[in-house]
Amino acid sequence: MKKQSKDVKNRQKTSGEDSSSYFRPKSKEGLLQILRDYEEDFTIIAGGTDLLVEHYQNLYKIDRWLDLNWVSEFKEIKIYDDKVEIGSMVTHERLYKLDKIKELYPVIQQAAADVGSPQIRSRGTIGGNIVTSSPAGDLLPPLLVYDAKLKLISKEGERVVDANEFFTGPKRNVMENGEIVEKIILPLRDEKYKGAWVKVGKRKALVISSISLALNLVFDEDEKIKESRICIGSAAPVPLRIESAEEKLFDKKASKVKIDEVAQIVADEISPIDDIRGTAKYRRQVAFNITKSALSEVINQ
Amino acid sequence: MKITLTVNGKKREVEVKPHTRLLDVLREDLGLTGTKEGCGKGECGACTVIMDNKVVASCLVLAPQADGSEIQTVEGLAGKDKLHPIQQSFIETGAVQCGFCIPGMIMSSKKLLDEKINLSEEEIKRGLSGNICRCTGYVKIIDAVKEASHKMQSGGEENV
């Protein structure tokens, strides 16, 4: 009889252990160790609310699951003097229920409340939303308007990427094979800022947005707009910041902003397509309307 | 691989494959067929169960992910010879038509009422937004949750 070697690290064991095709590291170090020990490709699972739908639909074979749900560091939210770090495995439910997120990053909080349904929000994660990189990902425009940075780790090392430079196309991003999003880093500002979030879809729950908008305006002591960010989701291959519209707002007093002009730039700059969730023409019109209403709301607050 | 779950208060040990769904563990391995499969992609809510105090679509949870967790299904609600006030209210208000969505509706309602007993209509609608009824009878389902809230506030919970 063939003897089993003793140094096999993932031999099937009882509850609480890794099995030969399912790995669940409990810590970041444990995760890196698995990435170092095994050359094979893993299918990395976070909340599973996108991945499992696709998996069960197509029934493609997954040889090795690497489950991030047990990595304790990835579930942490840390607040520093100048930044907030959100672990990639923080769920939408936690994001929208936490008072601190509501206070510091209201646009993220509102977008998280609009994701899917209670059943999806309890499992789906911010990291999963980012890595899936759908142009319709609800949390992506809010991350872009707050100048988020993403910390990626792999067995080779780590790097930090601007969220604005992370997305390269529908479901495509700059991540290399073997990289994992560890956390999202959001700057904390001293100045006053106000934001807005709009999601337009065919129904309120469980809907992929037809178009979405995130807005954040930073004001100086004289109530002038010191910095502005407008980002549109579902209307281009990536969540798209409209920089020419942002420039129009720079250094303006709220009362001097020409809202219609800015809204028109947004409608012109996006590159929507016709699909099941709406036509390109519809999306341009709605882009104009929601930019106008969001700007009016924030400026007249 | 082997996983251990506490289902409706009882410890259960099940042999699973990594890609087995929690839904299949409940229905096939444990025989708890109250939890239904509707769409199989997290959109209809028929497979809703409470896992570690969170509502989840059990069709989108891998069995190994539920290892060590506490699961509540519709079978665990009723007392020895008395229905849970939520179940009783669904009957009394006529909220049940074909019945397929009801176990999921009830588990979502349970989670809602566990968190907050006095719910506005908006809160009920939002809490049930992940559950679809294709007989299209939401009005009575919302009435049922309101009725359950009354029952539970006036002490209907003692038998559970």
Image (tube, rainbow, N blue to C red):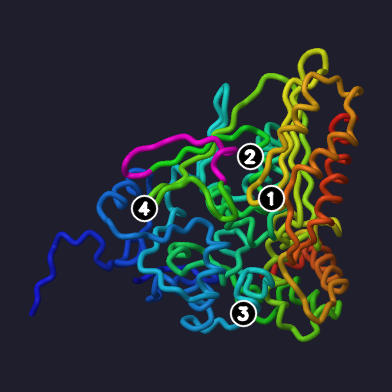
| C-alpha separation, residue under disc 4 versus residue under disc 1 | 36 Å
Are dots 4 and 3 on a single chain? Answer: no
Parent chain of label 1: A
The kind of secondary structure element at disc 3 is: loop
- The amino acid beneath tag 3 is Glu
Is residue A246 placed above or below B7 in the rendered structure? above
B92 relative position to A14: left or right = right
| C-alpha separation, residue under disc 1 versus residue under disc 3 | 35 Å
Is residue A61 placed above or below A200 in the rendered structure? below
Are dots 4 and 1 on a single chain? Answer: yes
Query: Magenta span covers which residues?
Result: A154-167
Residue topped by disc 4? A25
Label of residue A143 in the image: 2
Looking at the image, is mark 3 or mark 2 nearer the viewer? 2
Looking at the image, is mark 1 or mark 3 nearer the viewer? 1
Looking at the image, is mark 2 or mark 4 nearer the viewer? 2
Label 1, residues with CA under 10 Å away: few <14, some 14-19, many ≥20: some
Looking at the image, is mark 2 or mark 1 nearer the viewer? 1
Question: Per the image, is A166 magenta?
Answer: yes
Circles 4 and 3, Cβ within 8 Å, touching? The answer is: no
